[in-house]
Image (cartoon, grey):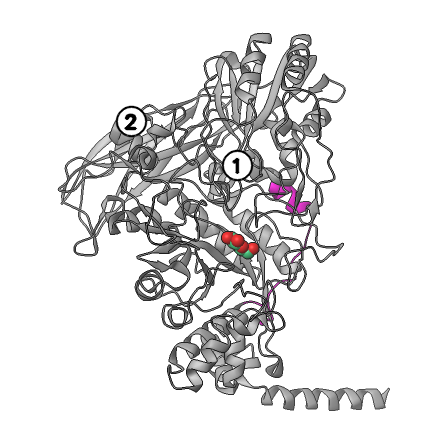
Amino acid sequence: MKKMALACVAGLALFSVQAQQLPVYLDGNQPIESRVEDALSRMTLQEKIAMIHAQSKFSSPGVPRLGIPEVWCTDGPHGIRPEVLWDEWNQAGWTNDSCVAFPALTCLAATWNPDMALLYGKSIGEEARYRNKSILLGPGVNIYRTPLNGRNFEYMGEDPYLSSKMVVPYVRGVQSNGVAACVKHFALNNNEINRHTSNVIVDDRALYEIYLPAFKAAVQEGHAWSIMGSYNLYKNQHCCHNEYLLNDILKGEWGFDGVVVSDWGGAHDTDEAISNGLDLEFGSWTNGLSSGTSNAYDNYYLAYPYLQRIKSGKVGTAELDDKVRRVLRLIFRTTMDRNRPFGSIGSPEHFDASRHIAEEGIVLLQNRNNVLPLDLNKVKKVAVIGENAIKMMTVGGGSSSLKVKYEISPLDGLRHRLAGQAEVVYARGYVGDASGEYNGVVTGQDLSDNRSAEELLAEAVDVARSCDYVIFFGGLNKSAGQDCEDSDRQALGLPYGQDKVIEALAKANKNLVVVNISGNAVAMPWVDEVPGIIQGWFLGSEAGNALAAVIVGDVNPSGRLPFTFPTSLENVGCHRMDAYPGVKRASENIWDITYKEGIFVGYRWSDKEKLQPLFPFGHGLSYTSFSYGKATLDRNELSASDSIHVTVPVTNTGSVAGAEVVQLYVRDVKSSVARPLKELKGFRKIQLAPGETKSVTFTIDKSSLSYFDDKQHVWVAEPGKFEALVAASATDIKSKVAFQLK
Ligand code: BGC
C-alpha cells in the first residue's frame, strides 16, 4: 500500500514537471494565437508546404514530427459521406460509416426556423466529430438564381436575409462539436453547367446585396472556421484564388481568420494560389503520366511548385506563413481542442432531429376542399402512385450522396402509419430512373420495370379508380440532369411524362394529392385539377415518416417556400434577360455569364415585373387558419443610428394548433436608385393553440433600409418614407405601416 502511494506521488511529481515543460503549442490553456505562433516557429519549410495541400482525397498531413494531427474533411452538407479510398473516389468498404441523412438544405430553409438550423448543425456536427473529422464541407448558401441549377437542393433558397438567418445557427451548431463548418461555394456558383468555365460578370450591388450576405453572416456572426472557394471564375480569375473575393472582401473587409479550402480540383495556378488567398488545396488533377503517378500530391499547385518558387527566391514566405497560421488555428480549434465533445453517430436523437426538421420543412402548397389531412374516418383504401414513393433519394446527387443507416420511403412511411386503418395499394405510374448507385454505394433497390408507359399509366388509373384517395409521389430525383451536381436541368417541367400521369389521375379520382419530391421548383400545368399539392423536398432518413405524419395530420404543416415557384422559365429574371448559361468566348472555353437581372432575383423580379407566381416565396398553408391584426409602430420616425419596432398580433382562428411564419418586408417608397418593391427583413415562426393570439415584434434599423452604393462602396440608407409590410408570403400582405428615416 505504502509503496503504491509513493509511486503515485512520484507519478504526480513527474506529471507536474512534464506539464510545466509542455511546449506552448501543446498547452490547451494557452491562447490559440500563442499556440499558433509557437507551432509555426518550430516548423520547417517543407513541413509548412506539406500542411497546405492534400495528402489524400480528403486529408492533409498536419505535422507528424510535432504531433500536430492530420486535417480530415468530409462532405456535407446533409450527412457524413462514407469513407473513400486514400486516392480514389471508390468506397473504402468500411462497415461502420453509415450515417443519418438529414433533410436537404432547401428543406431546412423551408422551416423558416433558426432553431431547426441549430439542431441540424449540432446533430450533423456530432456525426462528423464521431467520425473524427476536422472539417464538414457544408453548409451551402449559393443563391437560387435559376430553377435549373442542379445543386439548388444543397442551398438555402433565393433570399439573402433568410439564408443568412439560417446559416448562422447551422455553423454554430456544427462548430460546437469542435468541427469546422466549411461554408460553400464562395462565390457566385449559381449554376452547375459549365461550372469550371463560367466567368461571372455581376455588378457590385447585386454581389453585395444578393450573393454575399449569407457568406458574410456565416463568417461574421457564425464565425465559420473555413470556407470553400467555388469552381467558377469571377473577374476572369478562378474563385479558389480570387484576389477580389478572397483577399479584398473575405479576409480584408470581413476579417475572416479561418481557412480558405479549394473546391476539389478548383485550384489552377500556383502564383495566383500563393497570393490570392487560397490556404488549403484539395482535389487537384494531375495528368498521371508525366506527373502524378507516384507523387500526385507533390505536384499540387501549393506543393512542389510553391517550394521551388521559395527556394529560388521568386517568392517570399509571408504568404506561406499566413496560410499555415490559418491551418494551425483550425487544428487548434478542432482536433487539438481537448475539450471537444466525443460526438455520436446514428443515434436515436439524430433520427429524431432529422424527422423533426423534415416535418417542419414540408410545405403544403395547395389544399382545395380540405383534401388534406387524409381523414381516416372516411378513407379506407389509399392508392399510392409514382416512382418517388419508393425510390431512395439519399444516394446520388453528387458529393452530398450518402450511405445511410436507413431511409424510410414515402410508401413505407404511409403503410406503417395507416396500418390497421386503411389499405394501401401501390402502382408505379411511370418509370423514371431505375438506377441506384453513386460512387460505389448501391441502394440495393431493383427498380427496373419493362412495361410500356401506356401499361404503367393504365394500371395507375385502375388503382386510382379502385381507391377512395390517391397520393402521387413524383418530382425529380438525384440523377444527372435533375437535382444533381455537375449538370443542370434542361427544363422546368417534370420529367418522365409525369404530367400526363397526374392529369389522368386527376380525372380518375377527385381526392388527389400530389407530393413533389425535389429541391427545385417545377412547372405544374395540372395545378387547377389537383386539389392537394405538397412540396416534399429530399427529406433524408425519415422522409416517409415525416410525409405520412403531415398527410394524416399528426403534424400540422408549417413549412414556407424559400424560393419562388414561377409559372414558366420566362418569368425568371435571368431567363427573361437571356442571362443563362452565358456566352461562350470565340477563342477559349470560357462562358461569360452576365447577371443582367442584377438585384432582381426571385420575388424581387416577380414584384418588379408584376408577375403572379405559381406559388410565391414565403408561401405555405396550414390545417388551421390565422388572422392578422393591424401592424403598429412604436414611433414613426427613426434616425440612422437607432431603430423602431413594428408589432402585429396574430390569432389562430381554426380548430387545431399550428405554426405561422410571420414575415416582415420593407419597402423604400422613393429612392434615387432602382430598388426592389420590397425585401424580407424579418420573420418569426410562432406556435399558436386554437383561439390563441400572440404579438410579434420586429426591429427595423438602418441595415433593414440600406442598399449597396457601388460607386462609393458603402451601404446607404436614404432619408425619406419607407413602409413595413407584415405578410404571410411575398404576395400575401396582411398589414402595412409607413415611417420616416430622418
Ligand atoms: C463539390 C464540393 C464537395 C467536394 C468534395 C466537389 O465536387 O463541389 O461541394 O465538397 O467535391 O467532395
Decide if residue 573 is on the left or right side of residue 51: left
Where is residue 172? Give x, y as percent.
49, 56
- Name the foreground residue: 329 vs 350: 329
- What residue is shown at x 67% (from left), y 16% (from top)? 383
- Name the foreground residue: 732 vs 446: 446
Query: Could one spot residue 550 in this view of the protein?
Result: yes
- What residue is shown at x 36% (from left), y 54% (from top)? 588
Residue at the disc numbered 1: 482
Decide if residue 147 is on the left or right side of residue 392: left
| Residue type beneath disc 1 | Gln
Q: From this view, report whether residue 647 is shown above or below residue 308.
A: above
Residue at the disc numbered 2: 735
Asked if the stretch drawn in magenta spans residue 632, the answer is: no
- What residue is shown at x 56% (from left), y 68% (from top)? 54
Asked if the stretch drawn in magenta spans residue 335, the answer is: yes
Where is residue 656? Give x, y as percent.
53, 22
Picture quadrant of residue 464: top right
Q: Give me the disc on residue 282.
A: none
Where is residue 108? Give x, y as percent.
51, 41
Query: Could one spot residue 31 in this view of the protein?
Result: no
